[in-house]
Image (cartoon, rainbow, N blue to C red):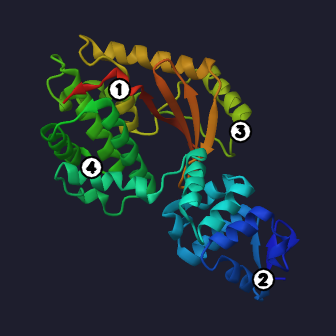
Amino acid sequence: MALIIYKTEISQPQQFSDKIQTLLQLIHQGMPCTEALIKQKQIVKCNSEEQFIEMLCLKLMGSILLYLHQLHLSVGTGKLLELHTQDLWTLAVLNNHNSEKERIILSEILAKYNLVDSNALNKIARFYHRYNLDYPAINLGASFDEKLTLYNVICYCEQAFTLSEETVTTAYHWATQKAQNLSDFARYFCIYLAWVNSQSKTLTSPDNLIETLAPIVNSNLNCPITESELDVVALQQMIKCWYQDGNNFGFSGFTSGLLSIVLNIDLKSEDVVKDASAYLDALQTTLRSTSCNAYYMSQSGLSHHYLFNSQRGEVILKLDRQGYLSLFSHWPSPSIFNLHL
């Protein structure tokens, strides 16, 4: 036999679990390629069915991100493996043919698993068009996760602020100058809008805002590392141990931390650094004393997200494939802002 999955010789695809067999139907040429691997002389070994699926997709497409054409959906294999077998089977059926009734079923599955299809992601293009903006150069080569970050930021900004073309255009150009990638662009864009919204007299420019808060952001980037996936129980134990060692949870990156702080303090304050420190203390208290209320794989399949409820909004911890567990975002309720820009 040429295919071995954790000491088990695979002589036919039917030996895979129902979920894996369904996933092979979703992957273009997935089943024929699997059958060819079984018949070949060279032995292929994988530690798990999940590892085999990743290997297969990399072999066929050079990526673990699939595009399901009939569903207009980009999704990672890790995310698909998170779906219940019945829901995965439904996606496979809908990927072959879908009527108006079936599109309703699809929308329910998308909502259930926090998935965003291409039709929804077109919000980005519509946003640029509405404000007569070009795609920023850093959009070229942007990862799917970066595009999702931009999508989420646009959704949030449209709820939190009443936008004018002048302010959006200025924010766009300022963010373009600051950012090294599309995720940073999205966060800087939102930071600019929050600064304008604050009408702060002490922070004379968005650059002054960054200069003021940079030291406290940079001192909060330390995060724990794990070698395994975390369920809710293991997550809480890891959080407990991290705090017992005298550490605070750090942010996923500079712009993640900066945006979280900017959105959750009063920028009109006479001492924003003091307020930022108080906010971070309260945030750490929330993580120490609150249980994770939901967790799921990201749409790209490259990270796990753990959701916590705070008094101001939703806090998300992210566990990436390198094992870093960090503060990814803290979105306060958009109603906190809602001023005309």
- In the image, which disc is placed on residue 263? 1
Mark 3 or mark 2, earlier in chain: 2
Drawn side of residue 136 relative to residue 223, left or right: left
Q: Which residue is mark 3?
A: 231
Q: CA distance from mark 3 to mark 1?
A: 29 Å
Amino acid type at image mark 1: Leu
Callouts 3 and 2 close, C-beta under 8 Å: no
Q: Is residue 67 visible?
A: no
- Vertical placement of 172 versus 249: above or below? below
Pointer 4: residues within 10 angstroms few (<14), some, or many (20+)? some
Pointer 3: residues within 10 angstroms few (<14), some, or many (20+)? some
- Vertical placement of 31 versus 194: above or below? below
Callouts 3 and 1 close, C-beta under 8 Å: no
Amino acid type at image mark 2: Ile
Looking at the rendered image, the disc whose residue lies closer to the viewer, 4 or 3, is 4
Asked whether 118 or 326 is in front, the reply is 118
Secondary structure beneath dot 1 equals helix
* Residue 186 placement: quadrant: top left
Q: CA distance from mark 4 to mark 2?
A: 48 Å
Residue 242 picture location, percent across and down? 62, 27
Residue at horizontal 81%, vertical 64%? 17
Mark 1 or mark 4, earlier in chain: 4
Secondary structure beneath dot 3 equals loop
